[in-house]
Amino acid sequence: MADVITKRADDYAQWYIDVVRAAKLADYSPVRGCMIIRPNGYALWENMQAVLDRMFKETGHENAYFPVFIPQSFLSREAQHVEGFAKECAVVTHSRLTANEDGDGLMPDPASKLEENLIVRPTSETIIWHTYANWIQSWRDLPILLNQWANVVRWEMRTRLFLRTMEFLWQEGHTAHATKEEAIAETKQMLEVYATFAQEYMAVPVIRGVKTESERFAGAVDTYCIEALMQDGKALQAGTSHFLGQNFAKAFDCTFQNENNELEYVWATSWGVSTRLIGALIMTHSDDQGLVLPPRLAPRQVVIVPIYRKDGERTAVLEAAERIERELTDAGMTVRLDAREAYRPGWKFNEYEVQGVPVRLAIGPRDVANGTVELARRDTREKAIVPQEGLARRVQETLEAIQQTLFDRARAFRDAHTTPVDTYDDFKAVLEETGGFVLAHWDGTAETEARIKEETKATIRCIPLPGEIEGTEEEGVDMLTGKPSRGRVVFARAY
RNA sequence: CGGGGCGUAGCGCAGCCCGGUAGCGCGUCUGCUUUGGGAGCAGAAGGUCGUCGGUUCGAAUCCGGCCGCCCCGACCA
C-alpha cells in the first residue's frame, strides 16, 4: 500500500508530517532544520505571493531587493533588536575554502578571514534603515513604501516543516513616514491586508490584536498580529505588522527636515508573512485523508480522471475529457486532465485526494453515454453524478462553495474552542481539556504573564483590537492576582 | 543544550542477542492481462550495512571513538 497518513487523533505532529510528505509539499534537506520546497509546495507559495503582491501594490507599495549579507556591526545598533536576534544568526567569517591541512576535505582558508563578519539576514530592518538614512533628507522624500520578497535565516534549535525552519521565504515591508499617526495608520492598514488575505483567500479565520511587551518584535514599539487556531487547539501567529516608532531612525541617524524646517527622526513600520502560512493552511483545513486546499489558492482547482477499458472507449472518453478541460480552462479555472496510462483511476483518486485538489471530475464510458460526469468535492468527500451540460458553471459554484465551507468550518471550530474563563482553575482546566483560545482577565504586568506561562505553557497571543471579540472589553480582575484588568486578553498554547 | 529513538537497496524495515556467501515489503525496469477508489502474474536491475579504528581465520553482527538525522523539552515567526 502507498503512504499511510497517521490519524490526527493518534499523533497530531506525525499527522502533520505525513500530510506534508504525502502531498509532496516539502522534503527534508541534508542540512538539519532546512527544507526543500517541492513544486506542489512552491506553487502554493506562488499563489499566495501573487495575491499578496497585488494587495501590496494596491496599497501603494513597490518591490525592491536588499542584500542577504549584513555587516555584523549593523545588528548591534538597536539595543532591543540585538537582544532579539543575536542568538540566532548565521555568521560569515571567511570568503573561501582551502584544502584541509591534515588530509582530505576542505576548511575555511585562514588567509581569507573577513575584516568584518557578515551575518545572514534574520530580517532586514538594519540594512534598510542604513539605506533609508541616505535616501531621506526632506519631508518631500516621504513616505517610502517598500516591500521585498526574500529568504531569511534564523538559527533555530528546533524546527518543523513550514512552521519553523532555519531558512524560510517571506515578504518584509519597510516603510518610512513623516508622522507617527501616518506610520500607525500604515501598520494597521497592513494588518488589515493580512487579515483579509487569511480569511478570504486562505479561508483561515483570524483574531486581530496587539502583542504584549514580552511577545513584541525586537525593536518595535507595538506589534500587531493575526492569530489563527489550529485543529489541535494550538494557536499560530500568521502575520505581524510592527509600528517601530523612531527606534531604527535613531539607531541609524535617519532624519528629515519637516515643513516647519525642523529636523526630526523618521517614523517606521515593518510587516511580514512567511511560508509559515502554508503550515497554517495545512493545519486548519486538512483531514485524516490528507491535504485540503482552499480553491482560491489551490495550484490545481480541478483534476479530470478519464476511465476506460477498451480502445474504443478510450477515444470517446478522452475526447469528452478534453472538451471539458477546455471548457473549464476557458472559464478561468486551473485544470489538469490526467490521462496518464501508467496509473489507474483508483490510484489517481487517492493521489489527488492526498494532494488536496478541491474538485475531481471522473468521466467514463457510462458518462459518455449519459452525458454526465462524476463530481467529487475534497472538503466534504461528497460525490455526485452531474450533467455535462452547464458543467463549467456548476464546477465554479462548487469551488466557491468549498471556499465558503472551509472558512465556515474553521470558524465554527475556532468559536467552539474560544472560551472565556474567570478563575485560574477554570483556565487550567480549559487548556487541558479543550485547548484553543482562552479569554481571561490580566493585570497588564509582565510578571503575571511570565508566571502563567511558566505554570501552564500558555502565552498571551494578543490583546484583541476593539470590537474584535465580543465581551473582551469589559473591565474585571486578573484571574491570578485579583488586580484590576482593563479587558480580556487571548491566551493559548502556541506554535 | 538536556531526554528518547534511529542510521542496512530510491522509501519503510528485518537480520545483530548467539560472528560464517545480505534479506523482506513498497517503489523502479521489461512483458502480458487489467482500468468506475492505491491491480495481478512472470521476469529483472539495484546495497563500500553512517564513519573511523580495534578484536578475530572471518564483522552488518562483538568492543571503542566520531558523525548525522528524527521525535519530545528549554528558545523562537
Image (cartoon, helix red, strand yellow):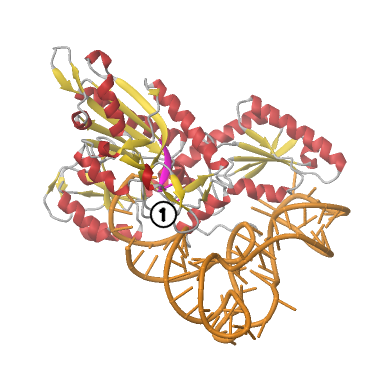
Judge from the rendering whether residue A41 lies leftward or rightward of residue A184; answer left or right: right
Q: Is residue A21 left or right of residue A61?
A: right
When the figure is inspected, residue A367 is found, relative to residue A56, above or below; the finding is below
Looking at the rendering, which quadrant does residue A39 occupy? Answer: top right
Residue B43, x across and y down, in percent? 83, 63
Residue shown at the point (65%, 28%) measured from the top left: A329
Where is residue A106? Give x, y as percent.
47, 51
Secondary structure character of the magenta stretch overall: loop
Q: Position of residue A309 (x, y in %)?
A: 83, 46
Around disc 1, counting alpha carbons within 10 Å, would you say few (fewer than 14), some (14 to 19), or many (20 or more)? Answer: some
Q: Where does the magenta region start and end?
A: A161-170
Mark 1, secondary structure of its residue? loop
Q: Is residue A56 left or right of residue A443?
A: right
Residue placed under numbered mark 1 in the picture: A232
Q: Picture quarter containing residue B42?
A: bottom right
Q: Is residue A356 visible?
A: yes
Q: Residue at x 45, y 40 (%)?
A: A407
The residue under the point 32% across, 28% down is A174
Q: Chain of mark 1?
A: A
Kind of residue at disc 1: Asp
Q: Is residue A351 magenta?
A: no
Is residue A360 shown left or right of residue A136? right
Task: Report the front residue among A109 and A4.
Answer: A109
Against A447, is A122 above or below? above
The answer to whether residue A402 is visible is no
